[in-house]
Image: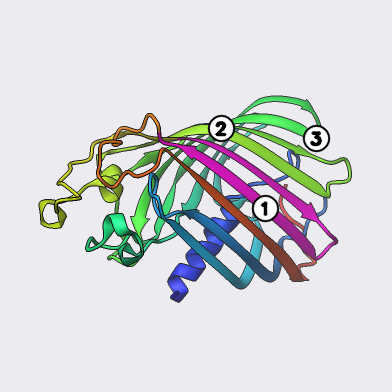
C-alpha cells in the first residue's frame, strides 16, 4: 500500500463518519495535531461480489478556520454560510481495488482510488431541539483517479437527507442518512464498461450509460472518551436494484455493505481558538 493510497484513505475514513455536533461546541482550539487510526471494508466497486479492506495509522491534523476546515466531519472550504443555508467545497475518497483480486475484472485495468471534490449545498430542514437537527445535502463532485495521471472520471451527484443527534454532555454523537447516487456516463463507464479488448466468453463487451448507481443508507456513531481520545464506527448499506447498468457483466450483487471503525488521538492543540 503506497503513501498516496494511505493518505487518501485517511481523508475518506474521516469523511465517512460525518458525526459533527448539530451546533458547534464552544471554545474549540483552532488546530489539533495527533494520530488517526482505522480500518474499513467496502465492496471493491458498486455491484461487486468482492471486497476491498484497508487499515492504517497516520498523522492527523484538524484545522477549524473561518473558510478552510479539516475536522472530524471531513475536509471542506466554506463559501457561503447562513443560519439555514451553507455552501462549501466537500471532499470524499473511495478505496482502490486491484483487478487481480476481483475475478470479474481479471485482466482489466485496476480501479484506483477516486478523489471526489466539488460544491455541496446544505439546507437546514428542521431543528426540533439544540441536540437534534435534520438537513438536506446536495453535493456535486468531480472524481479524480489517483495513480493514472489524475484523470477526471466524470461527475457524481449524491442528494441525501441527514439526521444528527448528540447526548446532552456532547460525549455521544450520531447521524443517519438516506439518499441516492447518480453518475454521468463517464463515471459509470469507469466501473461497468467492458471494452472489446477485455471481452471474453464469460464477460461480453458492454457499453455503460449514465444514470442511477445506487440508493444509500448510512449510520455512524462516535464517542469522546476524554479530551484527547475519540472512537467512532460507521456502517453503510447500498442497494443497486434499480441501477442503470445492472446488465453489465461486471455487476454481480444487488446490494453492498461497508463498515469501519477508528480512533483519533490529540497530542497537541493550539492556544488560539476556532472560528465559529
| Magenta span main SS | strand
Answer with mark 1 or mark 3, whichever residue precedes in sequence. Answer: 3
Circle 2 — which element? strand
Q: Is residue 175 above or below residue 48?
A: above
Label 3 neighbour load within 10 Å: few <14, some 14-19, many 20+: some
Residue corresponding to mark 1: 233
Magenta highlight on residue 221: yes
How far is disc 2 from disc 1 in space, using C-alphas?
Answer: 17 Å
Q: Is residue 163 visible?
A: yes
- Residue 79, label in figure: none
Q: Is residue 69 visible?
A: no
**Residue at (32, 43) in percent of width and height:** 251
* Residue 259 in picture, x, y percent from top left: 58, 52
Residue corresponding to mark 2: 178
How far is disc 3 from disc 2 in space, using C-alphas?
Answer: 20 Å
Residue corresponding to mark 3: 131
Residues at badges 2 and 1 in contact (C-beta under 8 Å)?
Answer: no
Residues at badges 1 and 3 in contact (C-beta under 8 Å)?
Answer: no
How far is disc 1 from disc 3 in space, using C-alphas?
Answer: 20 Å
Image: magenta residue range: 215-240
Amino acid at each position: 500500500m503506497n503513501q498516496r493510497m494511505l493518505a487518501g484513505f485517511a481523508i475518506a475514513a474521516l469523511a465517512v463518519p460525518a458525526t459533527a455536533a448539530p451546533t458547534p461546541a464552544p471554545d474549540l482550539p483552532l488546530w489539533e495535531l495527533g494520530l488517526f487510526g482505522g480500518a474499513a471494508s467496502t465492496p471493491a466497486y458498486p455491484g461487486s461480489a468482492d471486497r476491498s479492506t484497508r487499515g492504517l495509522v497516520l498523522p492527523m491534523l484538524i484545522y477549524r478556520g473561518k473558510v478552510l476546515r479539516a475536522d472530524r466531519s471531513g475536509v471542506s472550504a466554506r463559501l457561503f454560510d447562513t443560519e439555514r443555508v451553507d455552501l462549501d467545497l466537500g471532499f470524499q475518497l473511495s478505496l482502490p481495488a486491484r483487478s487481480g483480486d476481483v475475478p470479474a475484472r481479471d485482466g482489466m485495468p485496476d480501479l484506483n482510488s477516486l478523489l471526489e471534490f466539488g460544491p455541496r449545498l446544505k439546507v437546514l430542514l428542521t431543528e426540533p431541539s439544540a441536540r437534534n437537527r435534520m438537513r438536506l445535502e446536495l453535493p456535486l463532485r468531480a472524481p479524480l483517479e489517483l495513480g493514472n495521471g489524475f484523470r477526471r472520471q466524470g461527475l457524481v451527484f449524491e442528494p441525501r437527507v441527514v439526521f444528527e443527534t448528540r447526548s446532552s454532555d456532547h460525549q455521544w454523537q450520531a447521524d443517519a442518512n438516506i439518499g441516492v447516487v447518480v453518475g454521468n456516463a463517464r463515471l459509470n463507464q469507469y466501473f461497468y464498461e467492458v471494452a472489446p479488448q477485455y471481452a471474453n466468453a464469460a464477460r461480453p463487451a458492454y457499453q455503460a450509460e449514465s444514470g442511477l448507481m445506487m440508493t444509500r443508507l448510512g449510520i455512524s456513531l462516535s464517542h469522546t472518551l476524554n479530551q484527547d481520545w475519540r472512537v467512532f464506527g460507521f456502517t453503510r448499506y447500498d442497494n443497486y436494484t434499480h441501477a442503470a447498468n445492472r446488465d453489465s457483466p461486471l455487476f454481480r450483487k444487488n446490494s453492498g455493505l461497508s463498515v469501519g471503525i477508528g480512533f483519533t488521538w490529540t497530542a497537541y492543540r493550539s492556544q488560539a481558538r476556532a472560528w465559529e
